[in-house]
């Protein structure tokens, strides 16, 4: 039962990320907008500190809830980073089809950082539960 709850929680974090980063769905088109993509991290003029913080915070639950939580040491953080980057790349790719979204490399970096932070919190939480 506990694993089922954990799996559902992980799926919900993915849906949270997609729900916060993909809409409005009516702006998705059948053609790409590669010209809007910003390829160099932190080089985009539109950056606002609030956006950076929100991107990091959005992916912290993903890092916390992932199946890598049972891994030990650096493997846990590496797996959280790879999974966070992969999910972020999927989101940014979907945004290439949107008139309303701006896909950026900065988002990939900050989202990945959020996943790593979530994964890093796990050892402390696990230690407390053993005490």
Image: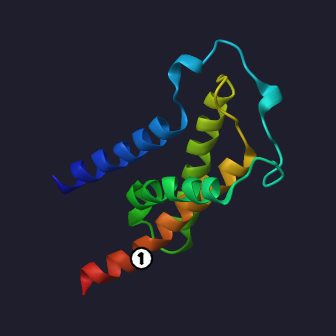
Question: Picture coordinates of residue 128 (x, y %)?
Answer: 30, 82
The quarter of the image holding the C terminus is bottom left
Front one among 73 and 34:
34
Q: Position of residue 54 (x, y in %)?
A: 55, 55
Which is more toward the observer, 62 or 55?
55
Furthest residue in direction left, as rendered: 1
Q: Quadrant of residue 29?
A: top right
* Residue 79: image location, x then y, percent: 54, 58
Q: Which residue is mark 1?
A: 123
Q: Is 103 left, or right, of 58 in this rendering?
A: right
Residue at 66% over, 22% down: 97
Task: Please count the marks in the image.
Answer: 1
Determine whether, in the image, residue 20 is placed left or right of residue 6: right
Q: Residue furthest bottom?
A: 131
Residue in view at x 36 percent, y 43 percent:
11
Foreground pick, 101 / 93: 101
Residue at 51 percent of width and 75 percent of height: 73
């Amino acid at each position: 039962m506990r694993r089922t709850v954990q799996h559902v929680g992980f799926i919900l974090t993915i849906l949270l990320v997609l729900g916060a980063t993909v809409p409005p769905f009516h702006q998705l088109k059948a053609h790409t907008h590669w010209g809007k993509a910003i390829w160099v991290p932190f080089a985009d003029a539109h950056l606002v500190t609030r956006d950076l913080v929100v991107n990091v915070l959005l992916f912290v639950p993903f890092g916390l809830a992932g199946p890598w939580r049972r891994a030990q040491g650096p493997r846990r953080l590496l797996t959280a980073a790879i999974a966070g980057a992969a999910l972020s790349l999927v989101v940014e790719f979907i945004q290439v089809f949107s008139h309303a979204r701006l896909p950026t490399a900065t988002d990939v970096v900050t989202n990945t950082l959020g996943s790593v932070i979530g994964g890093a919190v796990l050892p402390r939480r696990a230690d407390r539960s053993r005490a």
